[in-house]
Image: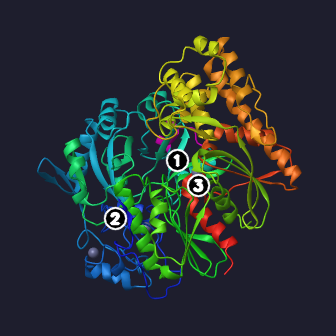
Amino acid sequence: MLAIFNPRKRGIKMTTPYRTMTYTFLPDTAICDDCLKELFDPESKRYLYPYIGCPNCGPRYALMKNVPFERQNTTMADWEMCPTCKEEYENPQNRRYHAELNCCPQCGPNYYLSENGERYEGEEMFRRVAELLNAGEILLVKNNGGYHLVCDAFNRNAVQVMRDKLGRPRKSFAIMVKDLEAAKEIVHLSEKEEAILLSKKRPILLAKSKSEELSSIVAPNNTDIGLMVPYTGLQHLLFHFGAPRYIVMTSANYPGEPTIHKEDQLTRLVEDFQCATLIGEREIERSVDDTVLKVTKLGAVPFRRSRGYNNLLDITLPSSRPILTVGADLKSTITLVKDQKVVMSHHLGDMTKYGTQLKFERTVKDYLAIHGVDLSETIIGYDLHPEYFTTKFAQNLEGYRHIAVQHHKAHLASILALKNKLSERVVGIVFDGAGFGEDGEIWGGEIFVGSVQEGFTRHGHLRKASLIGGDAAATYPLQALAGFIGDFDKDLFDRLQLPDPFPKALKIKEKNIRTFPTTSVGRLYDAVAALLGFHLDNSFEGEAAIALEYLASQSKVEEVYTFPWTGEELDYRPLFEEMIQSKLKGQSPSVIARGFHRSLAQAVVDVIQSLCEEYDTNYAVLSGGVFHNSLLVSDIFDLLEGSKIEILYDDEVPLGDNCISLGQAAILSATIIE
Ligand SMILES: [Zn+2]
Ligand SMILES: [Zn+2]
Ligand SMILES: [Zn+2]
């Protein structure tokens, strides 16, 4: 098995010429207004040309083979400019002066539609695409950073076919809407959200749904719909020629695998879907996922930090040696520090999938090479979890030193690095699904005090529950519930009448088979969701928690439960006792779900206030995927109102595990003195 990820065998032992970090990957940005105007101007030579672009817009990262960003270092190297394009490129007065990807319909790549052996081009192609989408067909469409699967978002059958074929029964699909007007008809948008939707990054924005019909199709049991507006010439053209105003646009990949970006990877999807493919002739060097963002009280938080973000961060980290860190396993990123400058990769994905492992390895190799980093001089950081793919990969690199960093400490350090507060003492709360603890147990409800420089001390945690059946407890919320209330009075279970796997899990717990202690708040969410009626499995990470937030959002706060902070642990026993009593009295699940959020927020605030006072600090940090929950976060901010405590956050840094590599790098840079 080692052979799969032995980097030495893959030749990842880099000694490359010295380069400064100024030359790095550039972000992909949305089509600019000038190009958009030309796209629909019949007088323009790029009228209706999908690959229109200029120095101010278009893909970069997705097409770059090397640095700096010059045509010969991109996938456009083999396309020769025609005389008029060349004249634009060389003329300092022209707005396309040094447009590295400059091309036009005469000299550049183009698109064609391949449908059952037929080939469509030009306007006929766009009309045919619109016709197919309006007829409920699914299409594969190449965008700047990879292929998307596309269909009419209001067509229940088409979306169901997509779900069945991808093995994605309930997870929400992102949609693309024609324009801002169309967006406003289906979601609530604040001014800030409108600006984000139209920003150069053009992320998928998670916004509160207004349309029950659309939610039930693309985002069931979810408060939000993930939507974006067109960011390429091609996408504008799809709508221009009559595509439905709301189309599903989900990256073309099977769950967890990287997005397909080359034609020779399409075979399985085309066979499964038997669909037409809109193929672009410009090659993509590396796939780029759409960024996913949500605005909460913690800022415009990237759930998935990818397209549109700068790799070069606007911070420095002190270090006399280069540092390479490889993040965690589920939402991995890598970070490289050299000459105190910091570059962080895009979201790389789920390392349990082979395709993602290859993408990860290639990213490490590329980052070392283009930044001229010599591995033998480099300090390598990775997660404490011994079984992570990234851990084993890092340990096999021929680095200068190898150092493991605890998962939840890395969470905190990522935010403090971006706030430039490496020496600031804070109270840190990290709530997530799972991370390997320093005692070898599974952590996920952690309370720390300290700074990046002096180190964080685990001051307390969620009271330990049982993770019954190991990983299975993360799949089955009812099994997670048994791990929290399994020791309660048995009469209660008769009255609650919870279905399998709850009773089965109790038996496993009794026999103490594969049962581990955990402090995971992710599992607490699952358990509460199960108590309140979510009896399905988690078909994707966070499903039960998202459903619980959705349920809670339908009520006002009517009940608050006791969830005491003992100074060492947050004791969930009274919380469950009171929720169960309320449920047995016939209280609506929605009111109880709302009460749970408020109670958890109150518990967090109690911890923050008591520890801030004890340790004489006014700063608190929240991290971990649980804090994507906007109801929880807004309750915390409400409860802290008027207090002098400041919660530190930053729009650049994800709360989920995309942040781990940055946090690892910050901790290594602050603690290694050489
Ligand atoms: Zn432009
Ligand atoms: Zn040309
Ligand atoms: Zn985490």
Image disc number at residue 205: 1
Q: Give coordinates of residue 651: x percent, y percent.
A: 63, 57
Amino acid carrying label 2: it is Ala
Magenta residue span: 181-189
Q: Compared with residue 351, is residue 80 higher up or lower down, i.e. above or below?
A: below
Left or right: residue 452 versus residue 158 is right
Calculate the distance from the C-alpha at mark 1 to the C-alpha at mark 3: 14 Å
SS at badge 2: helix
Q: Nearer the viewer, mark 1 or mark 3?
A: 3
Q: Earlier in the sequence, mark 1 or mark 3?
A: 1
Name the residue carrying label 2.
3
Name the residue carrying label 3.
654
Residue under the image location 54 percent in, 24 percent down: 506
Left or right: residue 235 versus residue 312 is left
Q: Nearer the viewer, residue 625 or 243?
A: 625
Ligand 2 sits in quadrant: bottom left
- Residue reaching furthest to the front: 511
Calculate the distance from the C-alpha at mark 1 to the C-alpha at mark 2: 40 Å
Q: Nearer the viewer, mark 1 or mark 2?
A: 2
Q: Give coordinates of residue 366: x percent, y percent.
A: 41, 73
- Is 187 colored magenta in this rendering? yes
- Label 3: how many residues lie within 10 Å, few (<14), some (14-19) or many (20+)? many
Q: Give the quadrant of the C terminus.
A: bottom right
